[in-house]
Amino acid sequence: MNFNYKYRVKTSDLWQASMYYAYSSFMGVVNIVCIVSSIVLIISRWSEASDLFRTVMILFLLTFTVIQPLFIWLRAGASLGGVYPELELAFSQAGITIISDGRKQHKQWKSVRAAVKKPTILLIYMEDGNGYILRNSVLKETRDELYAFLLDMIGNKEKNADKE
């Protein structure tokens, strides 16, 4: 079974991956608690609060709902440096072939650490610290099929490592 995808990496891809990572970690729990707390505080204290305290309550809410995601967006854009590289990923039984900037490399399945499916993206983590983000608009109807294939190949890698 072979899967081939050619696409440009976008700032929104990195932003989504960062937001999913942030909200699935301890920081996400803190963010949710702060958002809920700020909403409860605004509802319960708005009528009796001074203008200064109202401003502080609004800023507290905006910190976690607007400002933090905006900073994550800016960091994602800065990490791309204004360059949106075109990637070509080919998945086969032999491994993953990556073509970017005219360079071609092949990674065997033993160098794939994990595949994670999120609602809007598919993340592939490599042993060398690199990773690949495939958004739903690139995957189209092959999303579930590719994810099952990745899990199968990663599972086979672990089975083969046990035999060695």
Image (cartoon, rainbow, N blue to C red):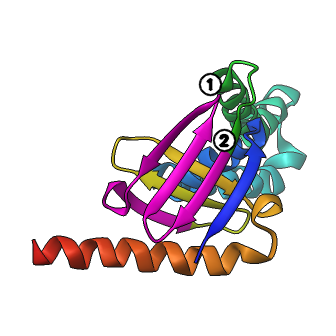
Give the quarter of the image for residue 163: bottom left
Q: Is there any visible trace of residue 34 in the rendered image?
A: no
Q: Secondary structure at mark 1?
A: helix
The N terminus sits in image quarter? bottom right
Is residue 90 found inside the magenta-colored segment of the image? Answer: yes
Q: Which one is in front, 91 or 134?
A: 91
Q: Residues within 10 Å of mark 2 (few under 14, many from 20)?
A: many
Q: Which residues are magenta?
A: 88-116
Amino acid type at circle 1 is: Ser
Q: Position of residue 76 (x, y in %)?
A: 67, 31
Is residue 32 found inside the magenta-colored segment of the image? Answer: no
Image point (64%, 30%), residue name: 102
Q: Position of residue 152 (x, y in %)?
A: 43, 80
The C terminus sits in image quarter? bottom left
Q: Mark 2 touching mark 1, by CB under 8 A?
A: yes
Disc on res. 79: 1
Q: Secondary structure at mark 2?
A: helix
Q: Work out whether 29 lies above or below 131.
A: below
Q: Work out whether 103 lies above or below 150.
A: above
In the image, 135: left or right of 27?
right
Q: Which residue is mark 2?
A: 14
Q: Work out whether 107 lies above or below 12.
A: below
Give the quarter of the image for residue 56: top right
Image point (65%, 28%), residue name: 101
Q: Position of residue 80 (x, y in %)?
A: 67, 25
Q: Main secondary structure of the magenta part?
A: strand
Disc on res. 133: none
